[in-house]
Image (cartoon, rainbow, N blue to C red):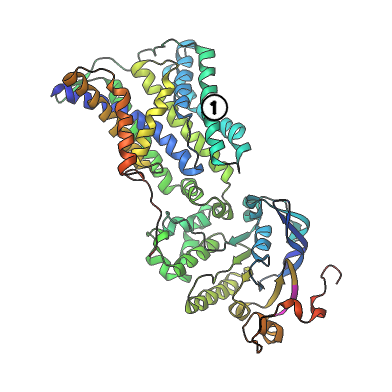
Amino acid sequence: MNEVLRVENLEVVYNDVVLVLKGLSLACPKGEITALLGANGAGKSTTLKAISGLLECEDGEVTDGFIMYQDEPIQKINPEKIVRKGIFQVMEGRRIFEDLTVEENLKCGAFTRPRSEMAGSMEKVYDYFPRLKERRKQLAGYMSGGEQQMCAIGRAIMARPELLLLDEPSLGLAPLLVEEIFEIIKKINSNEGVTVFLVEQNARAALSVAKQAYIMENGRVVMEGKAEDLLNNPDVQEFYLGMGKSGDKRSYRDVKHYRRRKRWLG
Amino acid sequence: MEYYLQLFINGLVVGSIYSLVALGFVIIYKATKVVNFAQGELVMVGAYICFSLTVQFHIPFVWAFVLTLAFSVLLGLAIERMVLRPLIGEEHISVIMVTIGMSSVLKSLVQLFWGTQIRVYPQVLPSEPFVIAGLPIAPVYIAAFVLSGVLFAIFSAFFKYSRIGIAMRATAFDQQAAQSMGIGIKNIFAMSWCIACIVSAVGGVILGNINGINSQLGHLGLKVFPAVILGGLDSLLGAALGGLIIGVLENVCDGAARQLLGLGGFREVAAFVILVVILMIKPYGLFGTKEIERV
């Protein structure tokens, strides 16, 4: 079994009416970093929330398709149980508990783990992020955006997941910090052997660490491949890396129809 | 002078009971953002259960007290499971209205089982007063004060150091993020109602030992509002101090009004006058959180 996560023909509906995912399929090979790229509103975050079960509290529902985690369907399970199975999501916008200290935030990350691991996990987090150690007694709300993102990833390390879901870790960070965060994600992936599924708008940063990537638009995957192939693909360069030659705005819709095969037919 | 000192001490004791009840109120508010209007009725139910066990079933007081606590846990679970869980995801205002309804139901149940007349607890502690600094103080007062202090210390430590306590604070801040950590927020809600029922029952039992109980005991819940508003709706320390301050102020104001102006019954309004003043000058209370703003 070398796919930790497999999503097939997933459909998600919000409020019983809004169809956000329209037959999405993808897979995350074990121990690798897989990226999911796309513009605003493409359904990236919804995909992650469907996997981690957090859709439930937003009135979203999986209406079709499966999510298989280690060959076991998980699409109807509540988020607490999913965390216990080894899937941990770092949510978009960091979602730090602002009136808890850094250390208490990290302890929350280890909520599902045995107490005996706590000290060891905490040391590990401080090894990755020495800055958090300096600030461990400080209220997390007073930290800078970058430090809060470190804290959010730190919580994930505390949970010792098999599969780590990251929702836009670069959001609102300076370019230098983005690079630092992605270096650490890569390090966590190789040191801990954790499979990473990364959702990003910052395509360049994501493709620099990912092994393969999916590009989605309008609730469907429209392109997939090895990260370096996508980096060199002229369409991707134009639409996601900002290297287009023509000045006029075009939609992805206008080009390369043949690439956009409907996945449920293929 | 001695008159006022005595009032002050009475105020501290009554205030420590307010603090306990306020603690329950704050815990529910912190974890679930529900303003619980049935808090006073929880006090009453606890008091009547303990009364019933000691007087009607002749169980020794200590055991009756322990059983009351156990009952409170069950009551908390039942309320959360049957009344509040179906309301998850509904408007806050509907949940608050439900707590008002619940207060009527609890009150009627108590009247149904035990009638409306005043019931008196059997003497548990000796009535011989201790003399502290020239003032006679009843042992039950001292016990009340100490018990409240101990409970506060326990719960403060619980929220600061225990894993579940921290998880409760996390849930209070951001439910969805807490869920993403694998924290079962339904369990956290149930837990906060259990704790609120326990501290309220303890408050009720103490009150019963001091004054006796009747079916109007639930009005105590109203007195808790000034206390929590003064202390800050989401602060444990605020609940403790707010309760004590309100207790002392209402006793001293009442005494002063009685002695200087010849007016009785000022006790009932003093707390609410204070409430209005606080809302005007410091709406977050003494220790309530203001939003953290990063600049």
Residue A84 vertical placement versus B253 (above, below): below
Residue drawn at 71 percent across, 71 percent down: A216
When asked about the image quadrant of residue A194, the answer is bottom right
Report crowding for label 1: few under 14, some 14 to 19, many 20 or more residues within 10 A (C-alpha): many
In this view, the residue in front, A126 or B152, is B152
Residue A174 vertical placement versus B38 (above, below): below
Kind of residue at disc 1: Met
Residue A101 image offset from top left, x and y in percent = 41, 57
> The C terminus of chain A lies in which quarter of the figure?
bottom right
Give the magenta part as a residue range.
A222-226
The residue pinned by badge 1 equals: B102
Question: Which residue is farthest right?
Answer: A265
Residue A14 image offset from top left, x and y in percent = 69, 54
Residue B162 in view of the camera: yes
Question: Which residue is farthest front?
Answer: A248
> The N terminus of chain A lies in which quarter of the figure?
bottom right
Residue B151 image offset from top left, x and y in percent = 38, 35
Residue B64 image offset from top left, x and y in percent = 46, 20
When asked about the image quadrant of residue A249, the answer is bottom right
Residue A121 shown in magenta: no
